[in-house]
Image: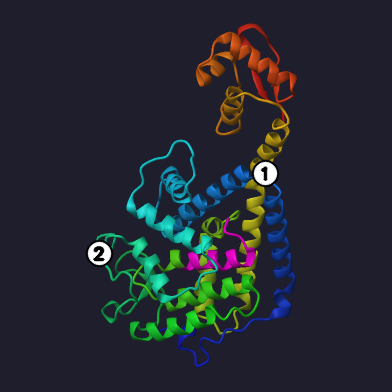
Amino acid sequence: MGSYIHNLSTWPDFTWDRDALALRLSEVRYQQGLLLGRMSAIGFDSRTEAHLGTVTSDVVSSSAIEGERLDPNEVRSSVARHLGLDVGGLRATGRQVDGVVEMMLDASQNSSSPLTSERLFGWHAALFPIGRSGMHPITTAGWRVVAGDPMRVVSGAIGKQKIHFEAPDAARVPKEMEQFLSWFEDGRGDPVLRAGVAHLWFLTVHPFADGNGRIARAITDLVLARSDGSRERFYSMSAQIAAERKDYYLQIESAQRGVMNITSWLEWFLGCLGRALESAEETLSAVWKRDAFWRRADDFPLNERQRKVLYRMLHDWQGFLTTRKYVKITGCSSDTALRDINALVELGLLAKNEGGGRSTSYQIAW
């Protein structure tokens, strides 16, 4: 077996340079607080919309990192159903998608619950509901077995494979995981740094026959949810890792072949988290914009037709509003549609575009 950190005499006593990480850590913590503060100031519906979008992105991205493509619309439907949300366009979802969603939601919504072997087994069983990884049967809801040794992370065609990592022997896994879970629940140290340590530690033990990457990212979400003190997710570490997938694997491989001082890995982890928070700011700008619009609209006694059309225009709308479109959406008469639209223009919620006659159209007045 190659020279990996799990073979060192000091394993698993991770160390890092706190001074080298202090500035980046404080920046990330500030970003977290700023984002959560802004989200706490918006309406319930807008927060729910943001949470739904973030969890959907998390699930799709975490699976994509492993080369598994999930339908975002199917994932969104599964997330909405598990959250008990009444949203339009729900699709039927398969057990495989539901399993990933259940794991990710359990990690974030129940982050205060202890992480135990039984809980990890439940996550693993949810990921592999039929006990197979692709065409191959695997041990589910249990640690990997000796028959699967050596457990290797490889790439390349058969006969030309490159070994990136070889995990500890399966016989070591129960004790390794007992040690990991004991450390995980002792709660000492900054939770953001602990998220980075836990991610690397879990992947190095590689306790399952498959699914270790997705479970490691769920564990990361769990620790970050603890650091946020929130059951709702507004930024996706998995989405950022997916965007930096190549560098992510290089950083993991370098850390696993290095020494017990993991400052370099934690610097990258904090940087990736910071970029995830920046991406969330960009993604959520539309949510904040819509929330501000509705706060303004709530000052007026709008009828249900007007609210329905405005909602449609604020979500996945293409082109401009016309009287004909208004009639089609609401089922009202052309005269009623025109009165409703004119009222919205007078209230400053819609703006009339240039042109007139049959080409008259309107857009949201931001």
Q: Residue at x 60, y 12 (%)?
A: 336
Rendered location of residue 337, percent (x, y): 59, 14
Q: Nearer the viewer, mark 1 or mark 2?
A: 1
Callout 1 amino acid: Ser
For mark 2, does the 10 Å Cα neighbourhood hold few (<14), some (14 to 19), or many (20 or more) residues?
few
* Left or right for 9, reference 42: left
Instruction: Say which of 186 and 365 sits in front.
Output: 186
Does residue 119 belong to the magenta stretch? no
Q: Nearer the viewer, residue 351 or 187?
A: 187
Which residue ends up furthest to the front in the rendered image? 301
Q: Amino acid at mark 2?
A: His
Query: Start and end of the magenta stretch?
Result: 216-232
Asked if one can make out residue 107 in the rendered structure from this viewpoint, the answer is yes
Q: Residue at x 64, y 81 (%)?
A: 16
Query: Residue 285 got which mark?
Result: 1
Whichever of callouts 1 and 2 sits on the residue coming sooner in the sequence is: 2
Q: Quadrant of the image for the C terminus?
A: top right
Residue for badge 2: 136
Residue 4, x across and y down, in percent: 47, 83
Q: Residue at x 68, y 46 (%)?
A: 42
Residue 352 appearing in the image: no
Q: Label 1 vs label 2: CA separation?
A: 44 Å
In the rendering, at what x and y percent does residue 81 appear?
44, 47
Comparing 268 with 117, the one in front is 117
Residue at the (51%, 88%) spot, across then down: 11
Residue 10 is tagged as none
**To which quarter of the image does residue 340 belong?**
top right
Up/down of 79 relative to 62, above or below: above
Furthest residue toward bottom: 9
Which quarter of the rendering shows the N terminus?
Answer: bottom left
Predominant secondary structure, magenta span: helix
